[in-house]
Image (cartoon, rainbow, N blue to C red):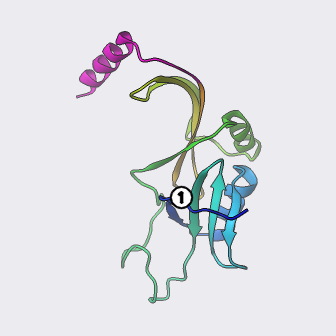
Amino acid sequence: MTFSINSLVPELWCSDFEASLKFYTEILGFNVAQRRSTDTHAYLSLQGSQIMIAWWDHDGTWEPLGPEPLEWPYGRGINFQFMVKNVREIHTAVLAAGLKPFLELNTRSIWRTDQMDERTQFMLLDPDGYLLRFTEVDSSRPVEQSDIEKLERFYIKRT
């Protein structure tokens, strides 16, 4: 089967490529979709989602983000959501590896414009501080007027 690259694939810079590769593949269950030999760059996939991880030698010929050095946590200001079909299994694997989730496993209603989803999710920091959210849709139903009113009250209160 040919590997098809998604139209948007975030590339995450790593401080330790092998540690990140092990984290994503052995703990979280990502597959290596593409990697050349021992190159410190790989496409990873999980149930249709794709990311790249990379480590580049900072020798002056290639600086990924300009002249400023990266500082942990690398992923400030963003989280990556992975829609999966086995969030509880992934969460169990995270705990078995001795990792502490950033946000524990929880279930909540999420508005998707055309429907309400009941989702179970948790969040985890990768070795370089990228925030990862793993989410599973447990059920869906039509949006009701009471949902819209509840959301409006929530967002009005926050502004």
Q: Is residue 93 left or right of residue 156?
A: right
- Crowding at mark 1 (Cα within 10 Å: few <14, some 14-19, many 20+): few
Q: Is residue 85 left or right of residue 7?
A: right
> Any magenta on residue 31?
no
> Any magenta on residue 141?
yes
| Magenta stretch: dominant secondary structure | helix
> Badge 1 is on which residue?
6
The structure residue drawn at horizontal position 57% and vertical position 71%, both measured from the top left corner, is 54
Q: Quadrant of residue 38?
A: bottom right
Residue 104 visible? The answer is: no
Give the residue furthest to the front: 1
The structure residue drawn at horizontal position 68% and vertical position 78%, both measured from the top left corner, is 36
Q: Quadrant of residue 14?
A: bottom right
x then y, percent, for residue 141: 51, 18
Q: Nearer the viewer, residue 8 or 90?
A: 8
Image height of 77 relative to 102, above or below: below
* Disc 1 element: loop
The structure residue drawn at horizontal position 41% and vertical position 26%, both measured from the top left corner, is 114
Quadrant in which the N terminus appears = bottom right
Residue 102 visible? The answer is: yes
Image height of 24 relative to 37, above or below: above
x then y, percent, for residue 48: 62, 50
Q: Which residues are magenta?
A: 139-159
Q: Is residue 92 left or right of residue 70?
A: right
The structure residue drawn at horizontal position 49% and vertical position 88%, both measured from the top left corner, is 59
Tell me the kind of residue under disc 1. Answer: Asn
x then y, percent, for residue 74: 47, 60
